[in-house]
Amino acid sequence: MKQQLLVKRENEFSYPIVFCRDFSDLAGCIQELYPDRRSACVITDSNVAPLYLNEVLEALSAVCGKVVSYVIPAGEENKHLTTVADIYRYLIREGLDRKSFLAALGGGVTGDITGFAAATYLRGIDFVQIPTTLLSQVDSSVGGKTGVDVDQFKNMVGAFHQPRLVYMNLSTLSTLPEEEFICGMGEIIKTGLICDEEFFRYCEGASGRIRRLEPDAVLHLVSTCCEIKAGVVERDPKEKGERALLNLGHTIGHAVEKKMNFTLKHGQCVGLGLLSAARISVNKGTLTEEEFGRIRKVCREYGLPEKVQGLTEEEILEASRKDKKMDRGQIRFILMRGLGHAYMDTSLTADELRAGIREILV
Ligand SMILES: NC(=O)c1ccc[n+]([C@@H]2O[C@H](COP(=O)([O-])OP(=O)(O)OC[C@H]3O[C@@H](n4cnc5c(N)ncnc54)[C@H](O)[C@@H]3O)[C@@H](O)[C@H]2O)c1
Ligand SMILES: [Zn+2]
């Protein structure tokens, strides 16, 4: 199985997203990209290194010049400039030059850090993504957003820097903790709701096969989701319009994430945010009660939470208003018009938001 999708970019290089069941095509893909045997540094985290680093190093060594690796401690708390500075020091020590490239092997944290290091080291070098979590495969590895957190503020510093290749070995999902898989599903369901009703229906119908990680089902799930996201990103690379729709479920989702002190994972909060946005859409008359029920059911089937405990309506409202997706003081809120269509609303009242928040409170 090797399936390929090409992300086309105006006035710039296009890059392939390759879907495989193992790492056997990786060397070939790199050789095609860099026939001149460049030097590479694989950056991975402390959980992923023991699982997949050797195999990836072996593949790259066959087709690259010098190949080195750097292991960062796993966890969002390390997505900081200090980790990036440690990487710079290592790259300098190892003598990586402008023609070298970085390879991000791991989840979204590794991808964001590596992409940012690549965007800034020597004013920018190439990088490739080898995402190993469901979330990074369907979301963070596609689109070229890279960055790090500053103190407790997420993704405050970063750069747009597109990878030259995204290589997905879908069988890496077999070692992923279930909770992480569920988080990826939050973003996947969101993607279907934004612009593809048929894909949403697929998520509804194939939940058993997807949860059992049946290879064909996972391939269809991940590749279709990437195709949809890549389409949105191609049409709006710098988030001037349509790309903002990808924030569906994220305003209230981020607020819950923050107010729960990050004890609930991002994808779980997105799931809650989707339910809130769906309730507001029902109240606005753009979504039916039956469609709302289908969204709740699919979230439940994949193990996403439906309620959050210990928070009040007012604190979530307050945090939602502080979310950075604001337009001159007014929240840019994404709502649904039926299943598979999202739209932006900039005129929601506090009461309309409260009704959405109440949906997810016990
Ligand atoms: N750049 C973007 O467009 C974008 C989009 C969405 C999210 N993000 C970012 O992505 C990050 C979240 O990504 P994530 O959920 O992948 O988190 P993550 O990178 O922390 O990975 C989750 C956990 O799974 C482990 N892991 C990774 N692959 C594994 C595997 N195959 N088997 C076993 N364990 C494995 C990791 O070590 C980690 O402990 C956040 O920092 C978020 O801001 C970025
Ligand atoms: Zn998200």
Image (tube, rainbow, N blue to C red):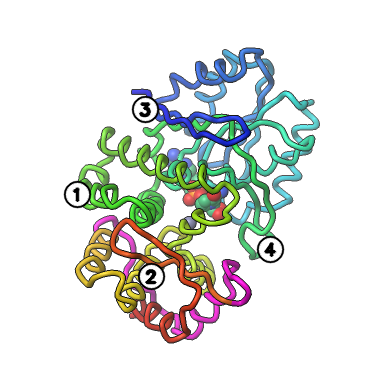
Residue 313 counted in the magenta span: yes
Q: CA distance from mark 4 to mark 3?
A: 38 Å
The quadrant of the image that shows the C terminus is: bottom left
Q: CA distance from mark 3 to mark 1?
A: 23 Å
Q: Which label sits in the foreground, 3 or 1?
A: 1
Mark 1 = which residue?
205
Q: Type of residue at label 3?
A: Arg
Of the residues under marks 2 and 3, which one precedes in the sequence? 3
The quadrant of the image that shows the N terminus is: top left
Mark 2 = which residue?
277
Q: Type of residue at label 2?
A: Ala
Q: CA distance from mark 1 to mark 2?
A: 23 Å
Q: Type of residue at label 4?
A: Asp
**Region rendered in magenta:** 301-329
| Secondary structure of the residue carrying numbered label 4 | loop
Q: CA distance from mark 2 to mark 3?
A: 36 Å
Number of numbered labels in the structure image: 4
Quadrant location of residue 71? top right
Of the residues under marks 1 and 2, which one precedes in the sequence? 1
Mark 3 = which residue?
21
Can you see residue 182?
A: no
The reply to whether the C-beta atoms of the residues labelled 2 and 4 are less than 8 Å apart is: no
Of the residues under marks 3 and 1, which one precedes in the sequence? 3
Up the image or down, 168 lies above or below 210; here it is above
Characterize the local packing of mark 4: few (<14), some (14-19) or many (20 or more) Cα atoms within 10 angstroms: few
Q: Type of residue at label 1?
A: Gly
Q: Which label sits in the foreground, 2 or 4?
A: 2
Characterize the local packing of mark 1: few (<14), some (14-19) or many (20 or more) Cα atoms within 10 angstroms: few
Mark 4 = which residue?
151
